[in-house]
């Protein structure tokens, strides 16, 4: 906190705060219940070192939440967010391939149908050639009389 009186600026250090309620609202200050003092938060470290204040006794931002609880809460929230994102990604990724087998199955059925049509066409062509050969050599009899070949002999 700074006060300006004309051209003179006075900076208030964290050690001037004597209670947790006056210390914790300042982001640069850390209150330690074990030593009952307000110190500057070591910004070079994410967590205050144990030599400065044990995590269970350190307060930052609010007096009712210690660093251990803050770490647990942030870890749970972060894990929940990551888990939610992973589940959403898996659902989106799994949903897309589930429609893909439908397309693959449709393509497979289409190819199978084409193969069956070509096979049927070859069968018809082969029967027509065989009928021409039978006709050429006189093996075609009456369609009504399958044993007509034997009657002519």
Image: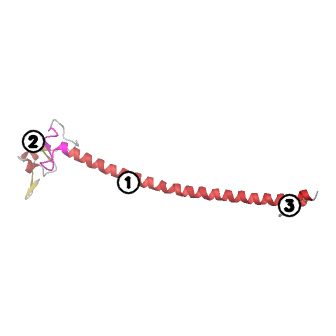
Cα gap from disc 2 to disc 1, whole angstroms = 43 Å
The spot of residue 135 in percent (x, y) is 88, 61
Q: What is the magenta range?
A: 52-69
Residue located 21% across and 42% down the image: 47
The spot of residue 32 in percent (x, y) is 11, 42
- Residue 136 on the magenta span: no
Local packing at callout 3 (Cα closer than 10 Å; few below 14, some 14-19, many 20+) is some
Residue at the farthest left position: 18
- Residue 66 on the magenta span: yes
Residue located 44% across and 52% down the image: 94
Local packing at callout 1 (Cα closer than 10 Å; few below 14, some 14-19, many 20+) is few
Of pointers 2 and 3, the one earlier in the residue sequence: 2
Of pointers 3 and 1, the one earlier in the residue sequence: 1
Callout in the foreground (3, 1): 3
Residue located 90% across and 56% down the image: 150
- Is residue 78 left or right of 12 when viewed as pictured? right
Q: Name the residue under label 3.
A: 132
- Is residue 152 left or right of 106 when viewed as pictured? right
Cα gap from disc 3 to disc 1, whole angstroms = 67 Å
- Give the secondary structure at mark 1: helix
Q: Mark 2 points at which residue?
A: 33
Of pointers 2 and 1, the one earlier in the residue sequence: 2
Q: Mark 1 points at which residue?
A: 88
């Amino acid at each position: 906190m700074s006060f300006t009186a004309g051209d003179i600026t006075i900076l208030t250090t964290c050690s001037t705060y004597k209670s947790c309620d006056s210390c914790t609202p300042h982001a640069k200050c850390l209150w330690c219940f074990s030593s009952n003092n307000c110190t500057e938060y070591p910004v070079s470290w994410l967590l205050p070192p144990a030599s400065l204040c044990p995590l269970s006794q350190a307060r930052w931002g609010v007096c009712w939440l210690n660093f251990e609880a803050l770490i647990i809460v942030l870890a749970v929230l972060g894990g929940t967010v990551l888990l939610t994102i992973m589940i959403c990604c898996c659902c989106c990724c799994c949903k897309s391939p589930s429609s893909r087998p439908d397309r693959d199955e449709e393509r497979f059925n289409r190819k199978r149908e084409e193969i069956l049509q070509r096979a049927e066409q070859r069968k018809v062509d082969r029967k027509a050639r065989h009928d021409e050969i039978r006709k050429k050599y006189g093996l075609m009899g009456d369609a009504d009389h399958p044993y007509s070949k034997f009657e002519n002999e």
